[in-house]
Amino acid sequence: MENISEHISWNEGKASQTAVRMGIDNTPDAETVARMKLTANNCFEPIRKHYGKPIIVSSFYRCWEVNGNVKGSSSTSQHPQGEAIDFISENMAELFEWIRRNIEFDQLIWEYGDDKSPAWIHISYSERHPNKQEVLKVKLVDKKMVWSHI
C-alpha cells in the first residue's frame, strides 16, 4: 500500500496497539483513506515541514471498535473518520502555538500533560463541513476529563 502522505506510512496511519492486543481489524476503507490523505496533507505535512524534524504519529485512524476501547468519544471522534491525528514531538507547546496561528484545522487539542506542555497534540481536518478552528485543552481532574476552550 502507498503512503498516506510524504511522512506518514500506511502502517503508521492504521497502527493501533489496542487493535493488535484485541484482535481487531483496524484497516480503513477507501473513502476513509482519502480523508486520511487530506488530513495528513493539509495538517501534518505543513507542521512537519515547518518543524523540520521527525514527528511521531501516536494515533491516526481508529475504527469505531478500537476507538471505543481507547475511551474515544464514540459519537463525535474524528479518528474513525480518518480526520484526526495525535502526535508527539519535542517543543510541543511552541509547536502547538505555531499550529494555532498557521494551519487550517477543525480542532486543535492540547491533550493532558501540564500547563507547560501537552502530553500529545490532537489535530483534525474535515472537508465534510467547514473547519471550526476550535482550540481546546483536556485534562484529568479527579479522574474525569475536563474540557476547556483556550
Image (cartoon, rainbow, N blue to C red):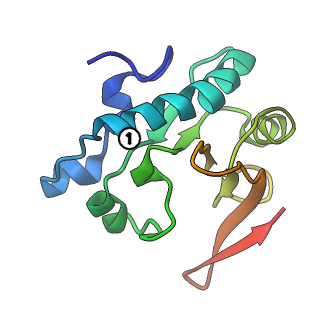
Instruction: Give the total number of marks visible in the rendering.
Output: 1
Q: Quadrant of the C terminus?
A: bottom right
Task: Name the one closer to the observer, 45 or 119.
Answer: 45
Q: Compared to 60, does 146 lie above or below?
A: below
Residue at position x 79%, y 52% from top? 116
Residue drawn at x 58%, y 24% is 41
Q: Position of residue 113 (x, y in %)?
A: 66, 57
Image-based side of 95 in relation to 90, left or right: right
Q: Nearer the viewer, residue 52 or 81?
A: 81
Above or below, 56 against 111 in this view is: above
Label 1 crowding class (10 Å Cα cut-off): few <14, some 14-19, many 20+?
some
**Quarter occupied by residue 2:** top left
- In the displayed structure, 108 sits above or below 46; it is below
Is 144 placed above or below 108 here?
below
- Residue lying at the far left of the rendered structure: 23
Residue drawn 38% across the image and 21% down it: 9
16 lies left or right of 150: left
The residue where tag 1 is placed is: 32
Residue 93 located left or right of residue 5:
right
Q: Pinpoint residue 149: horizontal percent, then vertical percent.
A: 80, 66
**Quarter holding the N terminus?**
top left
* Helix, strand or loop status at disc 1: helix
User: Residue 115 at what x, y percent from top left?
Assistant: 79, 59
Image location (x, y in percent) of residue 12: 37, 30
> On the picture, is 70 further left or further right than 54?
left
What residue sits 36% from the left and 60% below the top? 67
> Label 1 sits on what residue type?
Thr
Nearest the eye: 15 or 118: 15
Quadrant of residue 110 within the rendered picture = bottom right
